[in-house]
Image (tube, rainbow, N blue to C red):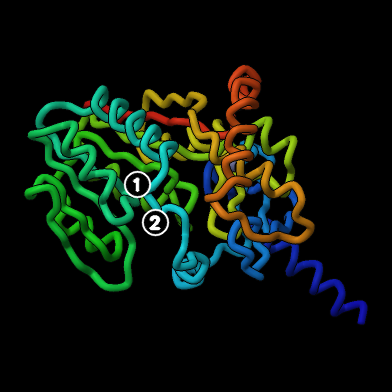
Amino acid sequence: MELSLQSDSETVAASQTQLACPACASSSISAGLHVPDHEYGLSYRACYRQCEACGSLFQDPMPSLQELAGFYPGDYHSMAHAGLLSAIRNRIRISRLESLASRQSAILDYGCGDGAFLVDAARHMPSRQFWGFEISERPETAHLANGAVTVVKGSLPDLLAVLPQCGLMTLNHVIEHLPDPLATVSALVRKLVPGGILEGQTPAADSLERFVFGARWSGYHAPRHTVVFSRSGLSRLLERCGLTAIATQGAFNPAGLAVSLASLPHRQGGRIRRSGLPWLCFLAAASLLGPIDLISGRPGVINFFARKGAG
Ligand SMILES: [Zn+2]
């Protein structure tokens, strides 16, 4: 009995030393926190560990791609485009891309959904070549906006086989869904021209919002978010992928705070409908609280920017 206990504790210690932070690679990892699904009511309870070095959070065990695919219901919100808020966010995103994109090089939206945002972007930024990618079991390529937009569906190798060198890559609320962000972003960086830019938006694990809401913080988006980066963890990951000039800043995204507020009455997870009067009330409350989030210096959602060295 004593022998078996000893061997059990050795097994736990061994697996803990092998566990490394997906952001900064530190093996100093704290105990896990189980987080239920507050938005779509799935029964799966994700376990998140926190890196003691950079403060990033990540699932342990990390779900497989197949398991992750099962976490997205048919009515998943990124499939919906309606709403003033999403129109405003798209405008902000397009002006940001416009200010960052060079004249000639292609622009990639990694995690583009059905490509509706890219069609909108192509209308505002004519004579640019846009590429979009969305993970899918069945590989398929579609040309939209009179050929200005090419949407590749399939696996990452399917995309890499056809993608030209890009001047700008954007990952809007995508990097926190990747089971192996180092491998994916490193592969993308190889398709970036020297001096090219990788940018995006993601929730921040070192936020005031997470401190206030705990396991009800929308940034977990459990079990769909695989790695939720702190600002320093994200910087470290981007550096490890070969990027420099890394910068982050607070972003406009009241929907995140609205989901945290709507999760407050939940005991063990639940569902949140992103429509109707209750949702509008949560959005209004989130918009009122927004300035606190920004002046706290610890924003709940961040924009990030990084550049590939010219050499
Ligand atoms: Zn870390």
Give the quarter the ligand 1 occupies. Answer: top right
Q: Look at the image and tell me in which quarter the N terminus lies.
A: bottom right
Task: Tell me where residue 34 appears, x and y as whole percent.
Answer: 72, 58
| Camera-side residue of 84 and 126 | 84
Where residue 10 sits, quadrant-wise, is bottom right
Front residue of 204/73: it is 73
Question: Viewer-proximal residue, 97 or 229?
Answer: 97
Q: Earlier in the sequence, mark 2 or mark 1?
A: 2
- Amino acid type at circle 2 is Met
| Position of residue 279 measured from the top left corner of the image (x, y, whole percent) | 59, 45
| Vertical order, 303 against 140 (above or below) | above
**Which residue type carries mark 1?**
Ser
Indicate the quadrant containing the C terminus: top left, top right, bottom left or bottom right.
top left
Query: Is 218 on the left-hand or right-hand side of 130?
Result: right
Pointer 2 with pointer 1, Cβ within 8 A: no
Residue at 54%, 40% in the rendered image? 255
Residue at image position (61%, 55%) is 272
Q: How far apart are marks 2 and 1 (CA)?
A: 27 Å
Image coordinates for residue 275, horizontal then vertical, percent: 53, 50
Quarter of the view holding residue 155:
bottom left
Q: Mark 1 points at which residue?
A: 186
In the image, taking residue 284 as reference, residue 100 lies left or right, namely: left
Residue at numbered disc 2 = 79
Q: What element carries label 1?
A: helix
Callout 2 secondary element = helix
245 above or below 165?
above
Residue 309 image offset from top left, x and y in percent: 28, 28
In-front residue for pair 146/282: 282
Q: Can residue 171 be seen in this view?
A: yes
Determine the residue located farthest toward the front in the rendered image: 277
Residue placed at 19% from the left, 48% from the top?
131
